[in-house]
């Protein structure tokens, strides 16, 4: 008969090995690290949990009680606020905003970074300096001239200027450029020998090989588009294309809205970013590690 004895698990590899964990000082250090991580997680999750539990309180309990937990848990109050807020269409509008912003962020910023990192045409250093210079300028400085140009071009009332704004982000260009500069030149030269144009090289070779950085830029673009308020409010305000953040503001200005209804509305706005973080947190941490190694 075959020997079905359990095999020993392979030794752990990494910063701390099994041999190191036998040391008392290492054990104490691990306990301290675990305690700090748990403390940071508790501090980070506390506002989210508090907002979710506060949504179960009625107006009297919300204004007078200092208890962390509500007296009763009734999900019907969230259903009532959902129907009162009528946020379903605003969710769809935000998804349209997010989808277009992600596409423009990947294509336009990727093309500019491709030209600066790989093609390097005449004057690319000047363009690169302008991109880096724009990082030093606060976003609020460009808001007024951007809005004026949007009005002159008659682009207000729809998501087009928001999508184009996501496609002109200097931070995304820098991320793409740092990643493209690590490409072996032999891959680009081989594509040129095979007769690929610069655009085909980008779409068929560079972009498919850049999935890690594309995922990271997409996550940043999704989070930025979902949480953006001022520019969507100026462009989409008082229209049928209001996003969730704009709808929250208009909802808060209504006289019939109570603090508990507004708290539940905020919870509805927090759900998609939280889900996004838990789904793509591994990609975010991987990018931090890769960036640290390259630096």
Image (spheres, rainbow, N blue to C red):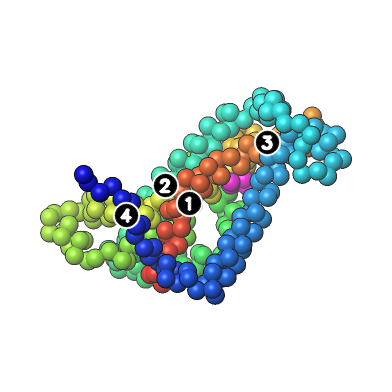
Tell me, for residue 104, which label it has, or none: 2
Q: Main secondary structure of the magenta part?
A: helix
Can you give x and y, in whole percent of width and height, for residue 69 in the image?
A: 75, 40
| Depth order, front residue of 97/295 | 295
| Depth order, front residue of 89/7 | 7
Name the residue that disc number 4 marks: 7
> Can residue 265 be spotted in the picture?
yes
Residue at 38 percent across and 52 percent down: it is 214
How crowded is the residue under tag 2: few (<14 C-alpha within 10 Å), some, or many (20+)? many
Q: Disc 1 or 3, which lies upstream in sequence? A: 3
Q: Disc 2 or 4, which lies upstream in sequence? A: 4
Can you give x and y, in whole percent of width and height, for residue 190 in the image?
A: 15, 60
For the N terminus, which image quadrant?
Answer: top left
Tell me, for residue 265, which label it has, or none: 3
Q: Secondary structure at mark 1?
A: helix
What is the C-alpha distance between the residues marked 1 and 4?
33 Å
For discs 1 and 4, the disc positioned in front in the rendered view: 4
């Amino acid at each position: 008969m075959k020997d079905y004895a359990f095999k020993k698990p392979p030794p752990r590899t990494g910063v701390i090995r099994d041999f190191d964990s036998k040391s008392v000082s290492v054990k104490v250090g691990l306990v301290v690290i675990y305690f700090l991580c748990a403390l940071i997680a508790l501090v980070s999750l506390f506002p989210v949990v508090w907002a979710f539990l506060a949504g179960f309180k009625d107006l009297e309990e919300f204004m007078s009680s200092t208890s962390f937990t509500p007296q009763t848990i009734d999900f019907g109050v969230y259903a009532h606020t959902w129907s009162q807020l009528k946020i379903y269409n605003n969710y769809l509008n935000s998804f349209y905003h997010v989808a277009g912003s992600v596409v423009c962020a990947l294509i336009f910023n990727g093309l500019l970074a491709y030209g600066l990192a790989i093609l390097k045409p005449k004057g690319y250093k000047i363009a690169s300096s302008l991109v880096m210079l724009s990082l030093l300028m606060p976003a609020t400085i460009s808001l007024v001239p951007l809005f004026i140009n949007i009005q002159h071009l008659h682009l207000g009332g729809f998501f087009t200027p928001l999508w184009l704004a996501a496609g002109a982000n200097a931070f995304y260009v820098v991320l793409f450029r740092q990643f493209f500069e690590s490409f072996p030149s032999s891959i680009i030269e081989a594509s040129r020998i095979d007769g690929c144009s610069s655009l085909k090289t980008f779409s068929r070779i560079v972009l498919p090989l850049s999935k890690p950085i594309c995922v990271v830029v997409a996550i940043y673009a999704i989070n930025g588009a979902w949480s953006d308020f001022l520019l969507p409010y100026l462009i989409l305000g008082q229209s049928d294309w209001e996003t969730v953040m704009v709808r929250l503001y208009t909802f808060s200005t209504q006289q019939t809205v109570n603090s508990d209804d507004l708290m539940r509305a905020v919870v509805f706005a927090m759900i998609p970013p939280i889900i996004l973080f838990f789904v793509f947190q591994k990609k975010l941490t991987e990018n931090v590690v890769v960036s640290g190694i390259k630096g």
